[in-house]
Image (tube, rainbow, N blue to C red):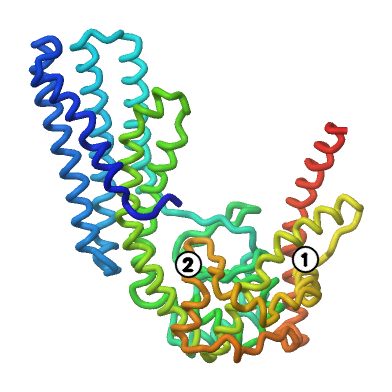
């Protein structure tokens, strides 16, 4: 996602340079008089529209601040208007350049290139407004489980939801990829495209094998905390608009790389990036507040030290997943295959348990917890907000929830089913890798 602080110098340059050039040519009488009569008013209108867009949008973002309700109300409404304005601005600037070139006698061919490139950029921005009408969908390699298919997991989720007074999610999905999240956005399963609506909770079978039951409860409590109060409404209203504006930026910047085309689409790209950055600042502040609020809910599901220990374990061992995937590819090429990558992940973590040595805790505290929709605050800030000293935490893997036989049986069955899905992709990748090796030889 493209975000960051607004670049005022660039956006003001994109707003003013072309219209001011048109005004100079018009007022100085450097070209044909009949065209100057068109160039002056067109330049003034384009300049005023650009300044109104930039400062008006910035004022709205300042007014909304970190208020969830204001951002959810203002941002979705203003984004389509702003994108249409960007398209009109880009078209206006193309018109100024064309009239200026014709006025001073510049070649028709160069003018045509600029016109086409600029209009393509304007069309790309306008076309991206379609994204605002689409419900965002997150794709996940996972399986959906009913209460009768995963009674231990559902029982824990029900218990936590009751403890922290949150809704029980409509859907529970499990996967191998390390991480946990809850979302009200649509989630589609990669293997069959089946889409789920309503609240969805994702649990990682790999990490479930490394956490104790109280730690799992704390993490689930944190994720369910995102389904409380205004969080769901904010996500449902703000996320599609933010995704649509981000799509406008990506669509515009992914056009052809010819020099003239880059110059012609530069204003549209600069405006789009500026609009995204203005509200990205608000979104970042709200995101941090949401995470700290959810951490308080997670701590209430168990205890602050329990949640803190779970966060550190997740930070320490999530990076083992790419390593395990590489090992799985090598095993497939050697004619071997693990029936359950989740248990292989657990074994790898136990062999690599020095990853939680005290000397590495400092580096772990700088890690941001993996999440498919945003970037969490650094773990150190989250532990400080919980009032927990990391040196006092029990980070052992000895008493994992999977030690309970019924839980182990459930996780093993789910792990084997998920491994079968993952192996389809691993085998395909291994075959491509082998063919490349043969061609290189």
Residue 155: tell me if it is visible: no
Q: On the image, which quarter does residue 291 sit in?
A: bottom left
Q: Residue at x 11, y 31 (%)?
A: 44
SS for dot 1: helix
* Residue under pointer 2: 183
Kindly report the distance in space between the C-alpha atoms of the residues bearing marks 2 and 1.
26 Å
Q: Is residue 283 above or below residue 103?
A: below
Q: Is residue 271 above or below residue 6?
A: above
Horizontal relation, residue 217 to residue 72: left or right: right
Q: Residue at x 36, y 17 (%)?
A: 113
SS for dot 2: strand
Q: Residue at x 33, y 26 (%)?
A: 118
Query: Dividing the image into 4 quarters, which one contains the C terminus?
Result: top right
Residue 139 or residue 94, whichever sits in front? 94
In the rendered image, residue 8, in percent from the top left (x then y), is placed at 27, 47
Horizontal relation, residue 382 to residue 116: left or right: right
What number is the disc on residue 50?
none
In the rendered image, residue 323, in percent from the top left (x then y), is placed at 74, 61
What number is the disc on residue 341?
1
Residue 440 or residue 399, whichever sits in front? 440
Pointer 2: residues within 10 angstroms few (<14), some, or many (20+)? many
In primary-sequence order, the first of circles 2 and 1 is 2
């Amino acid at each position: 996602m493209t975000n960051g602080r607004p670049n005022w110098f660039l956006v003001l340059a994109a707003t003013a340079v072309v219209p001011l050039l048109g005004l100079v040519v018009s007022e100085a009488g450097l070209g044909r008089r009949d065209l100057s009569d068109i160039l002056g008013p067109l330049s003034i209108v384009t300049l005023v529209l650009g300044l109104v867009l930039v400062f008006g949008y910035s004022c709205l973002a300042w007014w909304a601040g970190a208020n969830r309700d204001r951002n959810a109300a203002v941002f979705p409404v203003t984004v389509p208007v702003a994108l249409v304005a960007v398209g009109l601005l880009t078209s206006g600037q193309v018109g100024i350049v064309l009239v200026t070139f014709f006025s001073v006698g510049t070649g028709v061919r160069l003018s045509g290139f600029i016109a086409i490139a600029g209009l393509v950029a304007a069309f790309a921005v306008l076309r991206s407004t379609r994204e605002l009408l689409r419900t965002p969908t997150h794709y996940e390699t996972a399986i959906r489980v009913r209460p009768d298919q995963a009674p231990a997991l559902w029982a824990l989720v029900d218990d936590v939801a009751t403890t922290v007074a949150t809704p029980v999610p409509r859907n529970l999905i499990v996967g191998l990829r390390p991480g946990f999240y809850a979302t009200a956005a649509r989630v589609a399963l990669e293997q069959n495209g089946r889409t789920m609506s309503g609240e969805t909770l994702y649990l990682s079978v790999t990490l479930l094998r490394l956490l104790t039951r109280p730690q799992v409860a704390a993490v689930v409590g944190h994720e369910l905390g995102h389904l409380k109060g205004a969080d769901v409404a904010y996500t449902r209203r703000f996320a599609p608009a933010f995704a649509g504006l981000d799509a406008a930026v990506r669509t515009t910047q992914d056009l052809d790389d010819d020099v003239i085309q880059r110059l012609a689409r530069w204003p549209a790209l600069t405006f789009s990036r500026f609009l995204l950055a203005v509200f990205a600042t608000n979104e970042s502040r709200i995101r941090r507040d949401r995470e700290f609020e959810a951490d308080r809910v997670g701590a209430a599901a168990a205890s602050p030290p329990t949640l803190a220990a779970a966060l550190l374990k997740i930070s320490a061992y999530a990076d083992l997943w790419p390593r395990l995937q590489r090992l799985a590819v090598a095993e497939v090429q050697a004619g071997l295959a693990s029936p359950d990558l989740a248990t292989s992940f657990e074994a790898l973590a136990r062999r690599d348990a020095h990853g939680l040595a005290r000397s590495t805790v400092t580096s772990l505290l700088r890690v941001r917890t993996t999440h498919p929709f945003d970037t969490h605050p650094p773990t150190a800030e989250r532990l400080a907000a919980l009032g927990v000293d990391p040196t006092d935490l029990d980070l052992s893997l000895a008493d994992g929830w999977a030690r309970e036989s019924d839980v182990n049986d459930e996780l093993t069955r789910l792990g084997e089913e998920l491994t079968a899905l993952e192996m389809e992709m691993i085998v395909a990748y291994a075959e491509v890798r082998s063919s490349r090796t043969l061609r290189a030889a």
